Amino acid sequence: MFKHLKAVSGDPLLALIMAHKQDTNPKKIDLGVGVYKDDNGHTPILNTVKKAEAILLEQEDSKSYLGIYGATEFEAIIKELILGEGNPLIASGRVRSTQTPGGTGALKVAADFISANLKGARLWVSDPTWGNHKSIFDSAGVEVKNYPYYDPATNGLRFDDMMATLEAEVKEGDVLLLHACCHNPTGIDLQFDHWKVLTEFVNKRGLLALVDAAYQGFGDGLDEDLAGLRYMAANVQDMLIANSFSKNFGIYRERCGGLSVVAASADEANAAFSIIGQAIRANYSMPPAHGAAVVYTIMSNPELKAEWVLEVAAMRDRINGLREKLVAKLAESGASKDFSFIKDQRGMFSYSGLTLEQVRTLRSEYAIYIADTGRMSIAGVSDNNIDYLCESIAKVVG
Ligand code: PLP
Ligand code: TYF
């Protein structure tokens, strides 16, 4: 039965983690996968998560099934985080949100919903984008197209080219995927004025925006990071938002995210939400409970919520501080290349502009693990390894 099957290569990022794990060089550095790390290279459990888990251990009294949308009280928490407390959209009833297994689960449900209900719609993603975007929509039978985004010449955004391509090629009903903040893999974000232009464009051309918010809080602040998303949500009729709690609550393996649908009226939102429910049932029946229970416990307790806001700020400040240090140390180390663009990028990642050859040399000769594309996960840098890292990069770039 399986004789004809040929093994496929897995996600290169996950292969990179394994290669780093197996490397015995004591100086090894992992700048591969996008998880937050502290100065010891450890991905900690947040204090507020530990406290919430202690409460749950004490108070949880059943493991019976929830419903397809997960815990009903969680819907309000998703809306509050994504749209901001008191956002008039919430009271309007035009938004419905469901818990999902991670941001990935939200994207998968969105892909199935689009494939089954918006016939012929194509998905437009940035070049480059998170590798899983294409896999998820391909597997749901939605055609994926690229718009220009990253400019290797300036290590910046090609916004004019992005708009020119979209202007020329989108069809009414197509779906435009945007990263809310902390763009993965480049670290280069759309600015607020870009969101205004895109909102007008979405309305003019009859597109559906799908915004992926996986790193809320890691750029400039929990509210600041979603200012563009919120402007768009306030000024379009319909929209889909896939969000992840993996990074900002540090609960990666618990698989907790959300999918929100914004529609023209409460009735339309409820209809779309019921169809989203069908896609959920056919995929995994219902999401796992624990991550959402942790997030709910924190968000519904004013003291824990305030402490969590500070914990997110500490993760953000550490990463932004590392960006400043990297730029200063790379300049000091005499690298021939100008790396000052790293401090203008935001979030977990930086497209470093290092070539494939340079990345491979860093891996084989210096035990420094960076993705083939040159994407560095900044959280893997620390005061303990930054000197070795910058000296090694300087040697490799000449
Ligand atoms: N979207 C982007 C852009 C991501 O980088 C990630 C990262 O893991 C996700 C979605 C999904 O996150 P998760 O499924 O781990 O919540
Ligand atoms: O891009 C990253 O590093 C994160 C983590 O299949 C990740 O988004 C990477 C690959 C993957 C799942 C998560």
Image: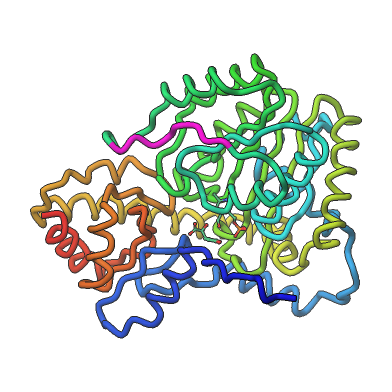
Residue 231: x, y in percent? 60, 27
Residue 27: x, y in percent? 25, 77
Say above or below: 249 vs 93.
below
Which residue is located at x 67 percent, y 61 percent?
298
Quadrant position of ligand 1 = bottom right
Q: Is residue 132 magenta?
A: no
Residue 295 picture quarter: bottom right
Residue 141 picture quarter: top right
Which residue is located at x 56 percent, y 23 percent?
198
Say above or below: 309 vs 289.
above
Which residues are the magenta region?
145-152
Which residue is located at x 89 percent, y 59 percent?
67
Horizontal side of 307 relative to 31 (left or right) equals right
Residue 241: x, y in percent? 68, 41
Residue 333: x, y in percent? 11, 57
Q: Residue furthest top?
A: 204
